[in-house]
Amino acid sequence: MRTVYTDEHRHQDGKFELIEGKFLPPFEMPRRAQIVIDRVRAKKLGPVTAPDSFDLEPVHRVHDKGLVSFLQTAWDEWVQAHGCYDALPITWHTRGFRKKPPLPEVIDGKLSYYAIDAGTPITAGTWRAVKGAVDVALTGVKLVNGGEKAAFSLCRPPGHHAGSDFYGGYCFLNNAAIAAQAFRDLGAKRVAVLDVDYHHGNGTQEIFYNRADILTISIHADPLQEFPYFLGFADETGKGKGEGYHKNLPLRWGAKWDKYEEALTTAMKALKKYSPDVIVVSLGLDTFKEDPISKFKLEHEDYFRMGEMIAGARKPTLFVFEGGYAVDALGINTVNVLSGFEGKR
Ligand code: SS9
Ligand code: ZN
């Protein structure tokens, strides 16, 4: 299968994230994508192509214009106010405030308005990297829409925590959601998004929650135990027209392949029943046993099986790269899924 990749991701290179009470160098780092593209080449998964450049119209199909323009100017506004440190918020819009407050005029307030956490630094190159990741996703769409059976969009930064008008969890714009909507706009009648990242795909769920034309399924750590904490429970099944077209499969900390396989079997059953024209996979590899911020216990081998099971749907499939922070193992695990999908071990 073809991989879409650009070095533009390197421009997202934060100094800090706030995690476990410490300012640490971000787990979401440029080496993540580097190690994956190296493995793609070493294993000869297929050709690697650079993305085309798209305008922002497909982005505006799923994201609020305010969020998109904020992401473009936030760094300059931040530097004017505070100098060249990473831009992170420290106040949140929570219960007890106005439901729909006006957008604050100052950068600190804007960060508080749009961000869901203090782990997602905006830096000098953030917008450049984010735009690159969207181009990578949309180029993958173009390939699959043009008849390729599958493609791998090696997006970085990831996207599945970003919603219509919020960012966080290392994500700024939702690459997978933008891709899913683009498939619809190119004529696909039904699209399914399968999110196998360790964390719940809250952004993707929020974006498509009231729609029946895009089925969303997420397998992830129980939100009672894990980020993003407030969405991703099994009783969330869609709203209005979208009722019955969202599925959450939360698993408790410590889940190994046996539990995971059960959930993935359930997911694939729902997906096959929906019979989509195309599948978008939010491919996170932070389910790995050595992931430094996660608590599932998948092994290298399990990722082949994951790929095989996804291939069982026999639909055109776009893989969109999401999380995974055991960097040394990230290339192996990612390419194992993609090789498994292609029936190669
Ligand atoms: C650690 C919380 C880390 C969010 C992680 C986002 C992962 C994106 N318990 N902060 S795939
Ligand atoms: Zn994750």
Image (tube, rainbow, N blue to C red):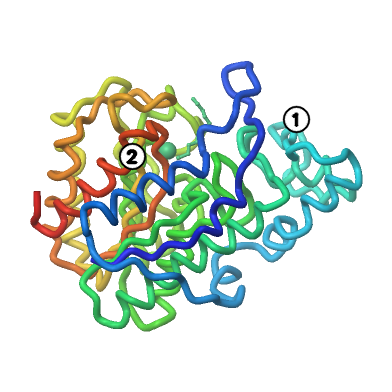
Q: Is residue 165 above or below residue 107?
A: below
Residue 188 or residue 341, whichever sits in front: 341
Please identify the quarter of the rendering in which residue 214 is found: bottom left
Q: Is residue 328 left or right of residue 167?
A: left
> To which residue does mark 1 refer?
90
The location of residue 62, given as percent across then percent down, is 55, 65
Q: Is residue 340 above or below residue 141?
A: above
**Residue at position x 33%, y 39% in the image:** 330
> To which residue does mark 2 refer?
330
Q: Is residue 5 left or right of residue 252?
A: right
Q: Is residue 299 visible?
A: yes
- Alpha carbon separation for disc pair 2 and 1: 31 Å
Residue 4 or residue 278, whichever sits in front: 4
User: How many numbered badges does the structure rendering display?
Assistant: 2
Q: Mark 2 or 1, which is nearer the eye?
A: 2
The location of residue 13, given as percent across then percent down, is 61, 43
**Residue at position x 64%, y 54% in the image:** 165
Kindly identify the amino acid type of the residue bearing the numbered disc 2: Leu
User: Assess mark 1: CB under 8 A from ligand 1?
Assistant: no
User: Assess mark 2: CB under 8 A from ligand 2?
Assistant: no
Kindly identify the amino acid type of the residue bearing the numbered disc 1: Ile
Split into quadrants, the picture shows ligand 2 in the one at: top left
Q: Is residue 187 left or right of residue 261?
A: right
Which secondary structure, mark 1?
loop
Please identify the quarter of the rendering in which residue 242 is found: bottom left
Looking at this view, name the residue that lies furthest to the top: 21
Q: Is residue 269 visible?
A: no
Q: Which of the two labelled residues, at mark 2 and mark 1, occupies the earlier sequence position?
A: 1
Q: Residues within 10 Å of mark 2 (few under 14, many from 20)?
A: many
**Residue at position x 73%, y 50% in the image:** 124
